[in-house]
Image (tube, rainbow, N blue to C red):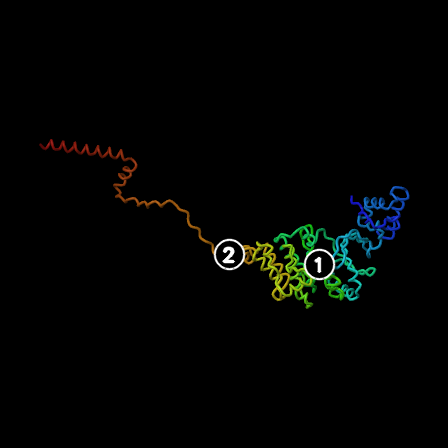
Amino acid sequence: MASPEKARPNDRAPEDLLPLLHASGVLGERALLDVRARVASGEYPAEPAALAEWLVRDGSLTAYQAKRLLSGKPHGLVVGRYVILDRIGSGSMGRVYKAHHQLMDRVVALKIIAPEIACNERVVARFQREMRLVGRLDHPNVVRAFDADRANRALYIVMEYVRGESLGERLKRGPVAAPEMIDYGAQAALGLAHAHEQGMVHRDVKPSNILVALDRKVKILDLGLGVLMEADDGATFATADGIAVGTVDYMSPEQALGKEVDGRSDLFSLGCAMYHLMTGKLAFPGPSPIDRLGRRINEPPVPITEHLPDFPASAQRVLGKLMAFKPQDRYATAVEASEALQALIRPRARARSSPAAAVAPPSRPVEASPAPTAPAPEPVPPPPVYPRWFAPLAVAAVDRPRLLLAAFAAAAASAFAAGAAVGYLVK
């Protein structure tokens, strides 16, 4: 069973955990009364750390909640209708938490926009407009948004909770194999295509905004949040270097120059992200964000074959088109980009298995060569025609040749004897 994270040495442990539990709002009134009763009866220990461990063990608290309470920070564990369960991660736009919807009993991902961004009224207005568009998104390759609101001057957006990891986290373990990354890129392009069809441009496509679920399904994160940076006049390289770095390494030339962008800008960013994920190197390297920004405006990317010598020429062409300097030289739509990426790993079927071939009229059958046979026998001549008086003799010659021969011999002998007798009498 998980145990609460230990408080930092400089964090002063509270003398009593029960008032902090009440102030946090994590437990309902009935659950809180039950905990108080068990502490009073001695079933639960009164010492704060020991009590927190018991509550984590029986599922009343999460380890993250216990750590916050033991650090004397009960506030911020409930945002609107959502109870914070754990911290998932953080990025340039804010922090992401695993949360629980109290009424619907649903686990979600809750992103709280960074306070330095959310305090700008222009950002708030832009956020509200973008969330109306985000609410229309419904695609298997896009993280769905359930809710968005403002609570205690904090902007937040509630999304589906997906088990998996971002490709930014995956990159920490090393580059992603090219075939695997091309498949991820094809899926990501389909998610972007759906957003583009709804009139949205992501503006911040990067590895940390591409999530891979446990079933290897890719989902695009943070749609609708990239525009918040544009609405924040204070988001400069000097004041928000961490934000700029996360954007500069993947942004398109036209976005870097402050020009109007469309879906083709996202394709450039996708190409840069794929390059980085497959090689572990940036396509436009440099010692500082300004240097890297200038390089993508003035120079082509480093050839990927310098890092992957065996990278296929066909894949080089697709990646090169994604990262073309001019938008008109890239794929016209994200759907076209996805099809090109899919063709690299799942070549199109041969003509014989294509739908056209399936409905084509059958070709003329080829006649089979006859099998060799024995030579035909020579024709039998018709039987000879004999005079009627000779027919019995012909039949006897066929059926009883010996009898007929004896008869002829006897007749010949008789004729010879008769002739001899006649000759004797004449003398």
User: Visible in this render: residue 189?
Assistant: no
Q: Is residue 407 above or below residue 107?
A: above
- Quarter of the picture containing the C terminus is top left
Q: Which badge, 2 or 1, comes first in the chain's sequence?
A: 1
Q: Is residue 53 above or below residue 195?
A: above
Q: Can you tell which mark lies on residue 405?
A: none
Q: CA distance from mark 2 to mark 1?
A: 43 Å
Instruction: Count the marks.
Output: 2
Identify the residue at the far front of this view: 287
Horizontal relation, residue 350 to residue 250: left or right: left
Q: Quadrant of residue 266?
A: bottom right
Q: Is residue 421 above or below residue 287?
A: above
Q: Quadrant of residue 358?
A: bottom right
Residue 394 location (% of width, % of height): 27, 39
Could you tell me if the residues under marks 2 and 1 are in contact, i.e. CB atoms within 8 Å?
no
Horizontal relation, residue 402 to residue 26: left or right: left
Secondary-structure class at tag 2: loop
User: Visible in this render: residue 221?
Assistant: yes
Residue 283 location (% of width, % of height): 63, 59
Secondary-structure class at tag 1: loop
Residue 352 location (% of width, % of height): 53, 55
Residue 343 location (% of width, % of height): 59, 57
Identify the residue at the far bottom of this view: 259
Residue at 87 percent of width and 43 percent of height: 45
The residue where tag 2 is placed is 362
Which amino acid type corresponds to the residue marked 1 in the rendered image? Answer: Asp
The residue where tag 1 is placed is 138
Residue at 24 percent of width and 33 percent of height: 407
Which amino acid type corresponds to the residue marked 2 in the rendered image? Answer: Pro
Residue at 53 percent of width and 58 percent of height: 360
